[in-house]
Amino acid sequence: MDYEFKKNMLDGSYHVVFSMGHEALGRWLIEEVSDDEAKITQILTQLGALKGTTKEWQLSGEEMSLILQDNEAIVQANYLFFNTEEELEEDMSHYDDEAVSCCGFEDLEQVLHAWRAFIAGR
């Protein structure tokens, strides 16, 4: 998983670019975590507590949620939790590549530590 953090020098906003298949992780990081140090610490604490267990933990956000289970982190757009009865035409499907991403606990820990350092200006 490749990623790059960027800061807009004009307005101070943060941007993240993740490799294909992990775009939702970048979106979640910007929209739901942002520069919230308490949230970063909360997630890192849960990652440590859940390693090697079968317990599950979820952090629901306004648009996206994080699910930690079986040493895997899943970031998913909240609209995917709802069961829609919408029928699509034959050979059509929903585009969900930017709506869900998965990675291991270690990868998420690495991203969160790097993000924390980046927003702190280190």
Image (spheres, rainbow, N blue to C red):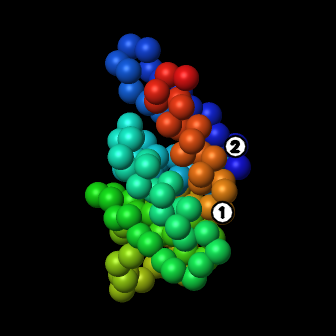
What distance separates the C-alpha of mark 1 from that of mark 2? 14 Å
Amino acid, disc 2 = Asp
Dots 1 and 2: beta carbons under 8 Å? no
Q: Residue at x 38, y 21 (%)?
A: 12
- Tell me which residue sits at (42%, 42%) in the image: 30
Instruction: Report helix, strand or loop for mark 1.
Output: strand
Q: Residue at x 55, y 23 (%)?
A: 122
Badge 1: how crowded within 10 Å, few (<14), some, or many (20+)? some
Who comes first in sequence, dot 1 or dot 2?
Answer: 2
Q: Position of residue 76 (x, y in %)?
A: 46, 64
Residue 111 visible somewhere in the drawing: yes
Give 62 or 46, whichever is nearer the viewer.
Answer: 46
Relative to 81, say whether 98 is above or below: above
Relative to 72, is 46 on the left or the right? left
* Observer-nearest of 55 and 78: 55
Q: Nearer the viewer, residue 87 or 74?
A: 74
| Residue shown at 57% from the left, 82% from the top | 54
Q: Is residue 18 something one can see in this rendering?
A: no
Q: Position of residue 42 (x, y in %)?
A: 41, 55
Which residue position is annotated with label 2?
2
Task: Judge the density around disc 2: few (<14), some (14-19), many (≥20) Cα neighbours within 10 Å.
Answer: few
The residue mark sitting in front, 1 or 2, is 1
Locate residue 71, reporting x and y percent.
63, 70
Q: Please give the residue where the numbered disc 1 appears in the rendered image.
A: 104
- Please name the amino acid that badge 1 sits on: Gly
Q: Is residue 3 above or below residue 39?
A: above
* Residue 121 image position (x, y, % from top left): 49, 22
